[in-house]
C-alpha cells in the first residue's frame, strides 16, 4: 500500500484524536459531554472524505477512545455498570453515522459517475456528427472540440482545447466582431459565413451558427459553435454566377441579332419590294402601251422582264415567310393533325379539279402538341409538292398517313407516284433555294421544303425523304408525341 | 395640286404616286386626288395648317396612306386621325409594300378601314386601287363634313 493510500487512514485517526483532545480540554473549562458529538462528527468526516476503510478505522478508534477516556472508570478499558448504556448508545450511533455516511458517499459517487458517463456519451454523440462543433468560454478559449471540428480544421481536440478560437483559426469576420458579439448577447444566437484557416494553412468557408449558453442566473457562460463546410458550395455558386452572366450576355447578343434580323426582314419587306413593283408595273404599262410598236423580240424582252420581276417578288415573299418561321413565337396547343389535313385537302380541291388523283388518307393522323398554323403550313407544302410533282402522271396517287408506333414520335408521311428524285441529291432537298428540277418543268422558289424543315425543327422533330426517279417520293416528318401518350 | 380633292394620297415614292394616279385615272378619279409626300404634310393638310392654311376646311372622302414615310410615319398619322374628334370618322386605307404582320395588326388596332398590300403584279394593283377608289370615294356615303362628290 502506498503512502498516498494510507493518508485517509491517518486522517481518520488524527480527526478522532483531535476530537478526543478537544473534548478533554473542554472538560478543563467545565464543558462536559462534548466527546459524543465531536467523535460522531470526526467519524462522519472520515467516512465522507476517506471512504469505508478509514471510516471503519475511525469508528473502532472512536469506540476505543470513549471506552478508555470517557466511560467510567475513566482511563481504563473497564466499563462501569452505570456507563454501559451510555457506551452502548455511543457504539450504536457511531456505527449508524458511519454506515449512513458511507452509503451517502456511495450514492454520491455513483451519481457523479453516471453524470460523467452521460457527458462522455454526449461528447461521443457530438463526435459522430459530421458537423464541426466546439464550445468556447466567453473569452473565446476552447473548452470542447468534437471530431467534426478536427476533420474540418485539422487541429485535434488536444491541440485546440485551451487555445483562443479566433487566433487558432484566424477567423475572418464579415463585419466587426463586436457587432456579432452584441447580437449574440442580445438574441442568444448568431449565424453567418466565416472564413477560417486550417492547420495546413488552406482556407475554408464555413456556415457558422453560434448559440449562447447561460447559467442559472442568466449570465453568459459559453458559446457553442457549429460549422458547415460550404467551400465547395461557394465555389459552385460562383461558377453558376459566372455562367449566368455569360448566358445573359449571350442572350443579349442573340436578342440584338434577332432584332437586326427583324429590322432586315422589315426593310426587305418594304424597301426591296417597292422598286420591284415599279419594274413590274412599268413593264406591264409598256407592254400595254407599246405592244403595237414593238417587234416580236422586244415584246419577248418585256415579257421576260415582267416574269423576272414577278419571280423575284415571289422569292422575296417566300424568303420573308421562311424567316418569319424562325422569328415568330410558336403558340403551342394540342393540334389534331387529321383535322389540319382535312383543311389542307379542301384547299387543294379547286386546284386539282380536272386531274385524276387518287387520294388515300390513312392510317388516321394523330394529335400532337404544336403550333397549329405552322403545322398546317408544313402539311400544305408537302401536299402541294405531291400535287405538283405528279402533274405529269395521267393517274396520280397521293397517300397521306401516320405511323404511330411505340416510339416517342408521331411520324407523318406523304407519298406520291410523281417524278421522284435521285437519292444522291436527298441532302439538297431541304436547303433554301435548292431545286432539283428545271423551272420550265416545275415552277417554285425552292423554299417550300426548307420551310417545312424549319417548322419541324422548331417542334423538336425530324424530316427526311425517300425517292426513286420516275417512280415517286415519300416525305416523312416526326413530331414528339404529347406527354403521357408515349 | 389645287388643295381640294376627295382622295388624299399620302405617298413618298414618286413612282408609286405615278402608278396610283394611273390606276385611279382609269376610273376618272385622278383629278380628285391630293398628293402629300410625308406624314407631317398629311397632318398639315388635314388640319388645314402650314401650306394648306387657305384650303376649305373639309375632310377628304378617303385617305390612302403609305406606312413608311419620312418625318411622321403612316401609323402615327393614323393614330393622330383617330384621336381627333374632327378627323376620326375619315375612312383610312393603308396601302403598303409590307407583308409584315405587326404593321397589319398595329393598323387594325388603330382602327384602319382597310389594309392593302401592294401586289408586285401591276394589274392586280390597278384593280385594288380602282376598287378602293370607287368604293371609298364613290360608293361609300362619306361621313358628314366630307366633300360631296363634285361631279
Image (cartoon, coloured by chain):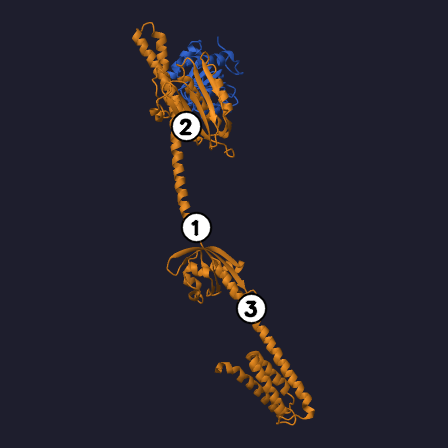
Q: Do labels 3 and 1 share a chain?
A: yes
Q: Color of chain B here?
A: blue
Q: Disc 1 designates what residue?
A: A233
Question: Label 1's element?
Answer: helix
Q: In which quarter of the image is the N terminus of chain B?
A: top left
Image coords of residue B106 (percent x, y): 47, 25
Image coords of residue A5 (percent x, y): 50, 81
Q: Mark 1 lies on which chain?
A: A
> Residue B89: in sight, yes or no?
yes
Marks 3 and 2 in Cβ contact (< 8 Å): no
**Dot 2, how many residues are within 10 Å of its Cα: few (below 14), some (14-19), or many (20+)?**
many
Instruction: Give me the chain that's orange.
Output: A
Q: Which of marks 3 and 1 is in front?
A: 3
* Distance of label 1 from label 2 (alpha carbons): 44 Å
Q: Which of marks 1 and 2 is in front?
A: 2
Question: Label 2's element?
Answer: strand
Say whether disc 3 or disc 1 marks the residue closer to the N-terminus: 3
**Is A102 above or below relative to A325?**
below
Say whether disc 1 or disc 2 marks the residue closer to the N-terminus: 1
Q: Which chain carries label 3?
A: A
* Distance of label 3 from label 2 (alpha carbons): 79 Å
Marks 3 and 1 in Cβ contact (< 8 Å): no
Q: Which residue is drawn at 30% across and 8% down?
A: A297
Image coords of residue A447 (percent x, y): 38, 23
Q: Which chain carries label 2?
A: A
Q: Disc 2 designates what residue?
A: A463
**Dot 3, how many residues are within 10 Å of its Cα: few (below 14), some (14-19), or many (20+)?**
few
Q: Disc 3 designates what residue?
A: A114
* Distance of label 3 from label 1 (alpha carbons): 42 Å
- The quarter holding residue B122 reads top left
Instruction: From the viewer's perspective, tell me whether residue A295 is left or right of residue B65.
Output: left
**Is A203 above or below relative to A269?**
below
Amino acid at each position: 500500500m502506498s503512502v498516498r493510500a494510507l493518508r485517509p487512514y491517518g486522517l481518520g485517526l488524527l480527526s478522532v484524536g483531535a476530537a478526543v483532545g478537544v473534548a478533554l480540554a473542554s472538560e478543563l473549562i467545565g464543558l462536559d459531554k462534548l466527546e459524543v458529538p465531536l467523535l460522531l462528527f470526526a467519524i462522519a468526516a472520515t467516512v465522507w472524505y476517506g471512504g469505508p476503510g478509514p471510516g471503519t478505522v475511525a469508528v473502532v478508534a472512536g469506540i476505543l477512545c470513549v471506552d478508555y477516556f470517557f466511560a467510567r472508570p475513566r482511563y481504563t478499558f473497564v466499563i462501569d455498570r452505570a456507563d454501559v448504556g451510555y457506551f452502548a448508545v455511543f457504539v450504536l450511533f457511531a456505527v449508524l453515522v458511519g454506515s449512513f455516511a458511507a452509503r451517502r458517499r456511495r450514492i454520491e459517487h455513483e451519481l457523479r459517475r453516471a453524470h460523467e458517463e452521460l457527458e462522455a456519451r454526449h461528447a461521443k454523440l457530438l463526435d459522430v456528427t459530421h458537423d464541426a462543433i466546439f464550445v468556447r468560454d466567453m473569452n473565446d478559449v476552447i473548452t470542447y472540440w468534437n471530431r467534426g471540428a478536427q476533420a474540418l480544421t485539422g487541429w485535434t481536440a488536444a491541440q485546440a482545447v485551451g487555445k483562443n478560437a479566433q487566433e487558432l483559426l484566424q477567423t475572418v469576420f464579415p463585419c466587426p466582431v463586436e457587432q456579432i458579439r452584441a447580437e449574440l448577447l442580445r438574441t442568444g444566437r448568431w449565424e453567418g459565413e466565416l472564413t477560417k484557416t486550417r492547420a495546413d494553412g488552406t482556407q475554408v468557408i464555413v456556415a457558422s451558427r453560434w448559440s449562447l449558453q447561460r447559467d442559472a442566473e442568466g449570465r453568459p457562460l459559453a458559446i457553442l459553435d457549429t460549422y458547415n463546410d460550404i467551400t465547395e458550395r461557394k465555389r459552385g455558386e460562383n461558377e453558376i454566377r459566372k455562367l449566368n452572366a455569360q448566358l445573359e450576355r449571350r442572350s443579349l447578343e442573340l436578342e440584338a441579332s434577332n432584332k437586326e434580323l427583324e429590322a432586315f426582314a422589315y426593310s426587305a419587306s418594304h424597301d426591296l419590294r417597292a422598286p420591284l413593283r415599279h419594274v413590274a408595273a412599268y413593264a406591264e404599262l409598256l407592254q400595254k402601251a407599246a405592244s403595237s410598236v414593238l417587234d416580236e423580240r422586244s415584246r419577248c424582252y418585256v415579257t421576260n422582264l415582267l416574269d423576272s420581276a414577278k419571280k423575284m417578288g415571289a422569292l422575296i415573299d417566300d424568303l420573308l415567310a421562311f424567316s418569319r418561321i424562325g422569328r415568330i413565337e410558336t403558340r403551342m396547343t394540342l393540334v389534331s393533325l387529321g383535322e389540319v389535313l382535312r383543311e389542307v385537302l379542301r384547299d387543294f380541291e379547286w386546284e386539282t379539279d380536272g386531274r385524276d388523283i387518287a387520294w388515300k388518307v390513312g392510317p388516321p393522323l394523330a394529335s400532337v402538341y404544336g403550333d397549329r398554323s405552322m403545322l398546317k403550313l408544313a402539311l400544305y407544302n408537302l401536299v402541294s409538292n405531291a400535287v405538283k410533282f405528279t402533274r405529269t402522271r395521267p393517274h396520280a396517287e397521293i397517300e397521306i398517313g401516320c405511323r404511330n408506333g411505340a416510339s416517342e414520335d408521331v411520324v407523318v408521311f406523304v407519298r406520291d407516284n410523281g417524278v421522284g428524285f435521285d437519292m444522291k441529291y436527298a441532302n439538297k432537298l431541304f436547303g433554301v433555294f435548292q431545286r432539283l428540277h428545271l423551272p420550265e418543268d416545275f415552277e417554285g422558289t425552292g423554299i417550300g421544303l426548307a420551310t417545312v424543315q424549319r417548322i419541324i425543327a422548331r417542334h423538336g422533330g425530324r424530316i427526311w425523304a425517300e425517292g426513286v426517279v420516275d417512280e415517286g417520293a415519300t416525305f416523312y416528318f416526326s413530331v414528339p408525341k404529347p406527354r403521357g401518350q408515349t | 395640286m389645287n388643295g381640294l380633292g376627295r382622295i388624299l394620297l399620302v405617298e413618298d415614292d414618286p413612282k408609286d404616286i405615278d402608278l396610283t394616279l394611273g390606276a385611279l385615272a382609269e376610273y376618272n378619279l385622278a383629278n380628285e386626288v391630293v398628293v402629300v409626300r410625308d406624314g407631317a404634310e398629311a397632318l398639315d393638310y388635314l388640319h388645314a395648317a402650314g401650306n394648306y392654311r387657305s384650303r376649305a376646311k373639309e375632310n377628304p372622302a378617303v385617305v390612302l396612306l403609305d406606312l413608311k414615310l419620312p418625318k411622321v410615319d403612316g401609323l402615327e398619322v393614323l393614330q393622330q386621325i383617330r384621336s381627333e374628334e374632327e378627323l376620326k370618322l375619315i375612312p383610312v386605307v393603308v396601302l403598303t409594300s409590307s407583308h409584315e404582320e405587326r404593321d397589319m395588326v398595329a393598323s387594325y388596332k388603330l382602327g384602319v378601314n382597310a389594309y392593302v398590300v401592294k401586289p408586285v403584279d401591276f394589274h392586280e394593283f390597278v384593280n385594288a386601287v380602282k376598287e378602293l377608289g370607287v368604293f371609298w370615294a364613290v360608293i361609300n356615303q362619306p361621313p358628314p363634313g366630307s366633300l360631296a362628290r363634285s361631279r
